[in-house]
Image: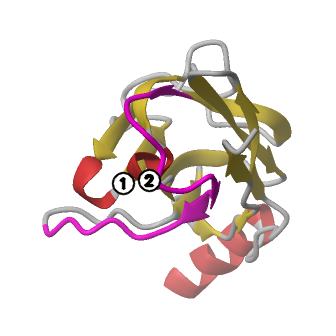
Amino acid sequence: MLIRITVIWLTLFGSSYSSTNTLSFEVERSQNAIIIDVNLANEDTLSGMQIPLDLSMSLLGYGVDSVYFAGFRCEQFFELFYKVYAEEDKLFLYMIESADATLESSPLLPGSGTIARIYLSRVGAPQINLWRIRNDLINDEKRDLRYLFWTNHAVEVPCTFSPADIDISQ
């Protein structure tokens, strides 16, 4: 019976997922602020994502002001939050369609566009003028905070990380 169900599942939903999901960034800078758009181009239907970012904000002399999800592709997700890990100079973004199967929600359908906007503001003198946004692990003994994307069938899928530079030298 289990083999038959598995065969039906694979026939209906397929056994592999696209590897053409890509996370990228657009960085705008003014005198005392940096705005980073977090963009996602996905061919897979997604139900959640975890995005740990190494922004090295303190080295650049900036701090996280806020992160907005409203008005962007994941705004209808059930849970949207961010956490700043100041001691590691990292930012963690978390977006999940629904943690409760009884709630009505919609996954992120294939498409492309902004999923979040990060606002940084000047908080001190810079120690460096250029930093490449990286995907990096965050040390947390209680939670798994790795770079992770999953489908509406709870299958982890790859997502290419396309870094961008933050240049404050001008």
Q: Main secondary structure of the magenta part?
A: loop
- Residue at x-position 84% and y-position 53%: 43
Q: Which mark is residue 89?
A: 1
Q: Please provide percent x and percent y for residue 38.
A: 67, 39
Crowd around label 2: few <14 · some 14–19 · many ≥20 (10 Å): some
- Vertical comparison of 74 with 170: above or below: above
Q: Which residues are magenta?
A: 119-141
Kind of residue at disc 2: Leu
Which element type, helix, strand or loop, lies under badge 2? helix
Q: Residue furthest bottom?
A: 3
- Vertical comparison of 1 with 65: above or below: below
- Residue behind mark 2: 59
Cβ atoms at labels 2 and 1 below 8 Å apart? yes
Marks 2 and 1 sit apart, C-alpha to C-alpha, by 9 Å
- Residue at x-position 52% and y-position 63%: 148
- Residue at x-position 33% and y-position 35%: 100
Disc on the earlier residue, 2 or 1:
2
Residue 137 belongs to magenta span: yes
Which element type, helix, strand or loop, lies under badge 1? loop
Q: Is residue 169 left or right of residue 99?
A: right
Q: Please provide percent x and percent y for residue 87.
A: 23, 56
Query: Is residue 101 shown to the viewer in this render?
Result: no
